[in-house]
Image (tube, rainbow, N blue to C red):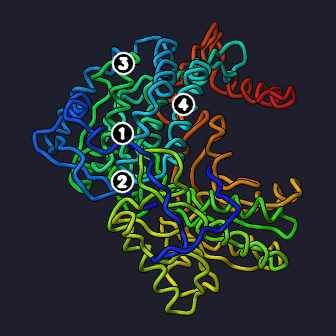
């Protein structure tokens, strides 16, 4: 991932001067950035942000400045951690069900006031409104899940002791303290507060560094959590340049949560390791979708649009490699291309567009470089392949490449944009091997009418999640199950028990009763050793664990 569920019509729109993708018209009276990001809104959201300098963020739709924001120095980061550390013990003493109730109130507030944050997400990321709504869905699901299940995840657990009945053992879960969170720009609601929710309900404070360009969304979430009952000092936000502020967050944190590029993730891991603090990392991906010979081609083509072009491909778990069985490849490519060319690009704060903008110049440069190099080296352009400055400075058409092969950069490097390469295959074992032939292992997708075959193929793929007959949403949205990466795609998991227990330290409390674990009742050392040996044999015979 670069540092940080829509369908299309069946008819192909007429070509425009710069490409085939039509533009979604803005509704009459559509809101603008000035309507949404007012001085009053900025003042409200930046209250309590520790920052002695000034910085700004901008909207990808036009490149114009959205807001002036506080900028944090290393000293400001230290102060934010001091505030959080002072507030955390009181929060940790709050009963877990009371902490969980904050998440459930937050769930309701997010859904009630979603229009506010949808505007902010669109303005800060440039994504289409339906793709922004995926973030609202994900955060609400996480808040509900941990609001309902946190007490069960965190409750004391009894274990069999070394001497059954005589040794009473309890496992407790203690909060780590102050969690340092570094969140990316591409999903500024879900990958900021969505990851912080289990940390809070586990009894921690959080110091978050969101990307400056998408800070308003994270600050909106903080404001709503405080309204839901979270003590303000427990949630600190620092803003500023990543290479300056990020290492300071790592330097002060009791645990680090990072989502971003593999390169930066290695640096974060090294900094955390030097201090012997835990870390969870969701990093890059070069995700593959496998369309098997028995797939429903029409459904697969529609699913590929969602899997490849949601949030303009700026999604860690989106598909960049499409492997299609040779018996259905021609039909699939025809249907997929028609759907892709019919996608409507748009920049209004309203539903209707199928895809929005890239977020920054760096993303546009990478996308352009990958496509132009591939075409120059013999790849065939099936759809897209051009920028759309007529819509906005960072728009690029959803792009399909065929006949892609190494050493084209698009084969192995993460593009993180609306670009997908098609590869044909004839043998399932072969395609599994090809799909696994990458340093990454975040997400995969398998399309087949045979559920048993789909599960068998999924089990062979070296990725943290696999979706059968969908691109990414079922696995990610099923929050009782863990989500994360293998290989260079990261360490640790979000969601489920792993997603909350990582924010705790396991503490074992063992109470020995009646007799000590030592020679007693007049036994000498040899007699005690013989007694324990007999006891161990008996416990194995009686199947004690």
Q: Give residue 77's quadrant in the image.
A: top left
The mark nearer the N terminus, 4 or 2, is 4
Up/down of 375 relative to 119, above or below: below
Q: Position of residue 33 (x, y in %)?
A: 30, 45
Residue 268's label in the rendered image is: 2
* Gap in angstroms between the C-alphas marked 4 and 3: 16 Å
Q: Position of residue 95 (x, y in %)?
A: 47, 11
Q: Give residue 327's quadrant in the image.
A: bottom right
Q: Label 1: which residue?
A: 217
Label 4 close to label 2 by CB (< 8 Å):
no
The foreground one among 165 and 84 is 84
Residue 293's label in the rendered image is: none
* Gap in angstroms between the C-alphas marked 1 and 3: 15 Å
Residue 227's label in the rendered image is: 3
* Horizontal side, residue 66 vs residue 405: left or right: left
Residue found at the far bottom of this picture: 377
Q: Residue at x 45, y 76 (%)?
A: 18
The mark nearer the N terminus, 4 or 3, is 4
Residue found at the far top of this picture: 514
* Horizontal side, residue 220 vs residue 17: left or right: left
Near mark 4 (Cα within 10 A), the count class, few <14, some 14-19 or many ≥20, is: many
Q: Can residue 287 be seen in this view?
A: yes
The mark nearer the N terminus, 3 or 2, is 3
* Gap in angstroms between the C-alphas marked 4 and 2: 29 Å
Q: Is mark 2 on a helix, strand or loop?
A: helix
Q: Which residue is drawn at 40% across and 54% down?
A: 126
The foreground one among 334 and 401 is 334
* Gap in angstroms between the C-alphas marked 3 and 2: 32 Å
Near mark 1 (Cα within 10 A), the count class, few <14, some 14-19 or many ≥20, is: many
Q: Label 4: which residue?
A: 140
Q: Can residue 174 be seen in this view?
A: no
The mark nearer the N terminus, 1 or 3, is 1
């Amino acid at each position: 991932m670069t540092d940080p569920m829509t369908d299309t019509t069946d008819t192909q729109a007429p070509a425009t001067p710069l490409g085939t993708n039509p533009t979604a018209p803005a509704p009459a009276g559509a809101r603008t950035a000035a309507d949404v990001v007012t001085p009053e809104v900025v003042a409200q959201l930046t209250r309590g942000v520790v920052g002695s300098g000034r910085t700004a963020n901008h909207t990808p739709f036009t490149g114009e400045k959205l807001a002036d924001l506080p900028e944090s120095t290393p000293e400001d980061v230290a102060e934010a951690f001091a505030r959080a550390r002072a507030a955390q013990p009181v929060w940790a003493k709050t009963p877990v069900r009371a902490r969980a109730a904050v998440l459930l109130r937050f769930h309701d507030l997010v859904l009630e006031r979603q229009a506010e944050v949808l505007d902010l997400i669109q303005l800060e990321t440039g994504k289409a409104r339906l793709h922004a709504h995926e973030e609202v869905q994900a955060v609400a699901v996480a808040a509900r899940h941990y609001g309902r299940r946190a007490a069960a995840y965190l409750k004391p657990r009894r274990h069999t002791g070394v001497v059954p009945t005589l040794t009473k053992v309890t496992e407790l879960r203690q909060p780590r303290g102050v969690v340092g969170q570094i969140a990316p720009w591409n999903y500024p609601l879900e990958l900021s507060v969505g990851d912080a929710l289990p940390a809070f309900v586990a009894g921690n404070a959080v110091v978050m560094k969101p990307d400056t360009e998408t800070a308003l969304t994270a600050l909106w979430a903080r404001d709503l959590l405080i309204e839901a009952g979270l003590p303000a000092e427990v949630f600190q936000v620092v803003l500023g340049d990543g290479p300056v502020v990020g290492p300071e967050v790592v330097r002060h944190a009791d645990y680090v949560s990072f989502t971003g590029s593999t390169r930066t993730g290695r640096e974060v891991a090294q900094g955390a390791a030097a201090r012997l603090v835990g870390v969870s990392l969701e990093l890059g991906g070069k995700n593959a979708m496998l369309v098997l010979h028995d797939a429903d081609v029409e459904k697969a083509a529609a699913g590929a649009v969602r899997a490849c072009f949601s949030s303009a491909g700026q999604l860690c778990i989106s598909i960049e490699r499409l492997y299609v069985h040779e018996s259905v490849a021609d039909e699939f490519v025809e249907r997929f291309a028609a759907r892709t060319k019919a996608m409507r690009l748009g920049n209004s704060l309203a539903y209707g567009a199928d895809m929005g903008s890239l977020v920054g110049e760096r993303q546009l440069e990478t996308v352009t470089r990958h496509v132009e190099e591939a075409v120059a080296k013999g790849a065939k352009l099936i759809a897209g392949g051009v920028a759309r400055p007529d819509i906005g400075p960072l728009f690029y058409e959803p792009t399909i490449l065929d006949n892609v092969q190494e050493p084209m950069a698009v084969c192995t490097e993460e593009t993180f944009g609306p670009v997908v390469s098609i590869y044909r295959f004839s043998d399932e074992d072969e395609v599994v091997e090809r799909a696994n032939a990458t340093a990454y292992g975040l997400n995969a997708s398998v399309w087949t009418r045979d559920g048993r075959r789909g599960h068998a193929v999924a089990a062979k793929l070296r990725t943290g999640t696999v979706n059968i007959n969908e691109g990414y949403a079922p696995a990610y949205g099923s929050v009782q199950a863990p989500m994360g990466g293998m290989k260079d795609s990261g360490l640790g998991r979000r969601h489920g028990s792993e997603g909350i227990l990582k924010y705790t330290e396991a503490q074992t409390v063992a109470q020995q009763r009646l007799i000590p674990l030592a020679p007693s009742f007049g036994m000498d050392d040899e007699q005690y050793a013989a007694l324990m040996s007999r006891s161990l044999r008996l416990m194995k015979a009686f199947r004690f664990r």
